[in-house]
Amino acid sequence: MATVGTGPAAALPAADLEDVLFKLPSAEPTPLPELVARTTAARRAFTAARYSDLGRVLPGLIATAEATRDASDGSDRRQASAVLARAYVLAAEHASKRHSDAAWVAADRALTAARSSGMPVPVGEAARVLAITMRRSGNWPSAVHLLAREASELDTANPRTGAVRTTLQPTAAYSAAAGQDRRAALALLNAADDDVKRRPDVPDGLFIVEATHTQVDVYRIGVLNTLGAPDEGVKIAADPNIDVMPTAERRARAWTDIARMWHALGDNQQTFTALCHVEQEAPQEVRRPSLRALTSHLLYGPARIQGLREFAARTGALAGA
């Protein structure tokens, strides 16, 4: 059975990912349990922020999932479509980390495969990554509309689908904030907060379902940053217990939002401290283009921060590193 490796490897370049999505490698169908196991291993690579491992296995995983779906029928085909959707969600998230337009292709294919599965959880997760891609391209109204439509079709009486619906609300809030619609953004966050207070924790599965108070608080910090009100996030940033967040990728993203908050407030030392937390949680996360740019801004700014130059060299933010 193929597994995700742990040795050093270069992440799949953005251009290569685009090429792969338009011309998948040859692959044979595989039994569904093996396909699920391979996809679960790839998902673990993402949540552990091992992006180079993920980039290496994505082409073969997507090709195998496509071949397995095409060779299946009935309930097996629906299940294979759900797994294929998960693989494309991972591809979209990987592309987004690299600021690659390949995220559009992967997210669109994820939603198509998810709809073919007829399963609400894959549809909700695929809609979420497509909406993120829309927002990052500047099309925030379409992102909010898509998420609102998908959320309205999820059964809130079912704990798992209800939790997926809750996860769509903070994503929609981020999209509304991108359009500077403060009232809508905060209303969506408050609705998500109310939902998590009423809903017990939901077991994790092949698709990530994280609907917690801490997650909503972290989104609130990012939303306030986007709305140009980082000062309102300071009190919130003091409360979330980031250590309880279940994955390294989520913990690193939480510290990223806090770093951006402090940077917007002009506190370079606190910004650097938060970036160090990002590196501690996920060394590959801090090498993302946006965080390298933030590190460079600190490095070439007027303040001198102990350890910053070494951090910049280690994370690729130092010119020539």
Image: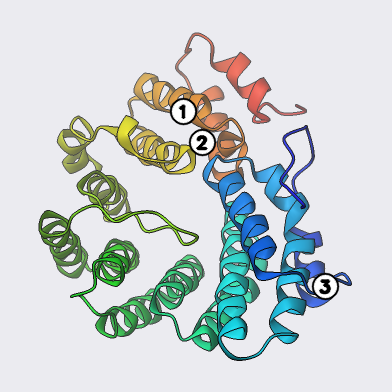
Disc 2 + disc 1, Cβ < 8 Å: yes
Q: Is residue 2 left or right of residue 116?
A: right
Q: Quadrant of residue 37?
A: bottom right
Circle 2: is it few (<14), some (14-19), or many (20+) Cα within 10 Å? some
Single out the residue that lies furthest toward the right: 26
Disc 3 secondary structure class: loop
Depth check: give the residue in front, 311 or 152.
152
**Hey, what amino acid is under mark 2?**
Leu
User: Who is closer to the viewer here, 270 or 246?
Assistant: 246
Nearer the camera: disc 3 or disc 2: 3
Question: Circle 2 sits on which residue?
Answer: 294
Q: Which residue is located at x 59 percent, y 30 percent?
A: 283
- Report crowding for label 1: few under 14, some 14 to 19, many 20 or more residues within 10 A (C-alpha): many
Picture quarter with the C terminus: top right
Q: Which of pointers 3 and 1 lies earlier in the amino acid sequence?
A: 3
Q: Position of residue 31 (x, y in %)?
A: 72, 69
Label 2 residue SS: helix
Kindly identify the amino acid type of the residue bearing the numbered disc 3.
Answer: Leu
Q: Which residue is mark 1?
A: 275
**Quadrant of the image occupied by residue 89:** bottom right
The amino acid pointed to by label 1 is Leu
Q: State which mark lies toward you, 3 or 1.
A: 3
Residue found 50% across the figure and 60% down from its top: 206
Relative to 68, residue 174 above or below: above
Q: In the image, is 87 to the left or to the right of 218? A: right
Residue assigned mark 3: 24
